[in-house]
Amino acid sequence: LMVGRFHERVSVSTVLGMVRFGVFAAVCLGLMVGVCVAEGGAHLLVQKAMLTNKHFAGSDVPVRYRIFNVGSGAAYDVQLEDEWSPEEFETVSGLSTGNWAKIPAGGNISHIVVVKAHTYGYKTTSAARVTFKQAPGSDETHVVHSNDLGLMPVLSVKDDDKSSNPHLAEWGLFLLGAIALVALPIVLLRPPAPSDAKKKMK
């Protein structure tokens, strides 16, 4: 009988402990949700990408920046800044900076600048910097950065000429070789002419 009562007390205390733990977990979850809601607002993601696969010295290289607002609120006073070394690059068109008064939640913007490398080789690039505010006129500024493209390979003008050369000489040699492969068996397997057969019989 005492053993049965002991088991009853243990089971009751276990159930009460589980209930208390569930209540505690629910309260913690509610607090976490409250904090997330309180901290809700704009959240920007920045993408920096080259729009050409190969880059040649002296040729235009378009660069696109895309800013996505994946947050629940609008971003205000959005500023884009990027640096291209004047010793390595020349800005052909557009600006490496930009500003927008507002990017709504779920919205995005695109910005393009065209640069040109002075010489060939591996060029260093940096991540773009974007600042924004959660509310108009706010004193608090948030900062995010784009992806870093790393070392940018720039090919020489000779490589550009090789890639654009139609290779007429190589194609001519290929066609001559193909014609020879087709014509040689025909010549070797050609049946003898009647005059040649008569000479062999004599």
Image (cartoon, rainbow, N blue to C red):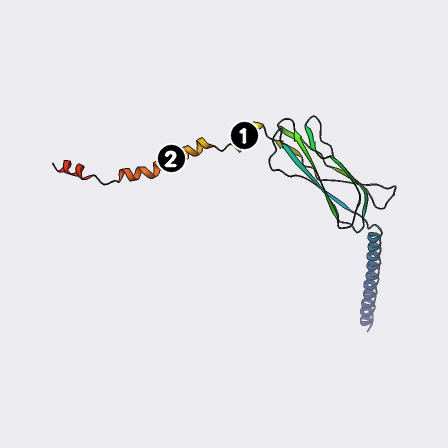
Above or below, comparing residue 74 to residue 79 in the picture: below
Residue at image point 41% right, 32% down: 173
Where disc 2 sits, the SS reads: helix
Residue kind at label 1, given as amino acid type = Asp
Locate the C terminus and report the quarter of the image it occupies.
top left
Badge 2: residue crowd in 10 Å (few <14, some 14–19, many ≥20):
few
Q: Name the residue carrying label 1.
A: 161
- Which one is closest to the eye, mark 1 or mark 2? 1
| Residue 110, x across and y down, in percent | 72, 43
Gap in angstroms between the C-alphas marked 1 and 2: 26 Å
Which of 52/36 is in front? 52
Q: Please, which residue is most extreme toward the front here?
A: 93
Residue 126 found in image quarter: top right
Q: In this view, does 30 lie above or below 132?
A: below
Q: Quadrant of the N terminus?
A: bottom right
Specify the farthest residue to the bottom: 1
> What is the x, y in percent for residue 168?
45, 32
Tag 1, which secondary structure? helix
Q: What residue type is labelled 2?
A: Gly
In which quadrant of the rendered view does residue 145 lie?
top right
Q: Earlier in the sequence, mark 1 or mark 2?
A: 1
Question: Badge 2 is on which residue?
Answer: 177
Q: Where is residue 95 in the image (x, y as percent from the top left)?
A: 73, 34
